[in-house]
Amino acid sequence: MKLMTASIGKTIPPLYSQDGKDPKDVKIRVKFFSIKSNYRWYITEGNKLPDGDWEFFGLVRGQDTELGYFRLSELQSLSPYIERDLYFGDHTLAEAKEKVI
């Protein structure tokens, strides 16, 4: 499975476009998860880079829960243990901060 597609890329707001917004108003656009651990990546914004990679910002849940930047290539390097949640519904950053969704 491809982690990113062109149609998904069109739905992701550019980096910094969500700054200052209430987490209840920030939508999670994509969720990736590890099938070998409890890690989850919730993407809220991102930019496609000139080399074709993506730089994302979002919430990462693992040993800790934190907001941060990461790249698609970093997730792809963990393949085949990373998948995109095909059934992830409409959720906000506030929900992801409160619990694993």
Image: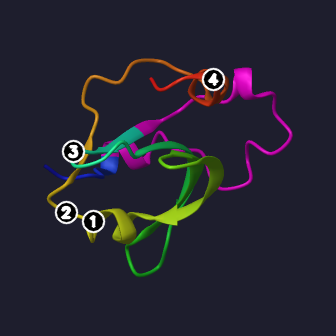
- Residue at disc 3, secondary structure: loop
Residue stretch rendered in magenta on the structure:
7-30
First in sequence: mark 2 vs mark 3: 3
First in sequence: mark 2 vs mark 4: 2
Q: Look at the numbered discs 3 and 4 and tell me whether their residues touch, using CB distance below 8 Å.
A: no
Numbered circle sitting on residue 35: 3
Q: Nearer the viewer, mark 4 or mark 1?
A: 4
- Residue at disc 4, secondary structure: helix
Q: Which residue is mark 4?
A: 98
Q: Look at the numbered discs 1 and 2 and tell me whether their residues touch, using CB distance below 8 Å.
A: yes
Q: Nearer the viewer, mark 3 or mark 1?
A: 3
Which residue is painted at 41% across and 49% down in the image? 9
Q: Amino acid under label 3?
A: Ile
Q: Amino acid under label 1?
A: Gln
- Quadrant in which the C terminus is drawn: top left
Which residue is painted at 37% across and 73% down in the image? 52
Q: Nearer the viewer, mark 2 or mark 3?
A: 3
Report how far apart the C-alphas of labels 2 and 4 lie in the structure.
Answer: 28 Å
First in sequence: mark 3 vs mark 1: 3
Quarter occupied by residue 25: top right
Q: Amino acid under label 4?
A: Glu
Numbered circle sitting on residue 79: 2
Q: Which residue is mark 1?
A: 76
First in sequence: mark 4 vs mark 1: 1
Above or below, comparing residue 94 to residue 81 in the picture: above
Report how far apart the C-alphas of labels 2 and 3 lie in the structure.
Answer: 10 Å
Report how far apart the C-alphas of labels 3 and 1 lie in the structure.
Answer: 13 Å
* Label 1 crowd bin: few (<14), some (14–19), many (20+), radius 10 Å: some
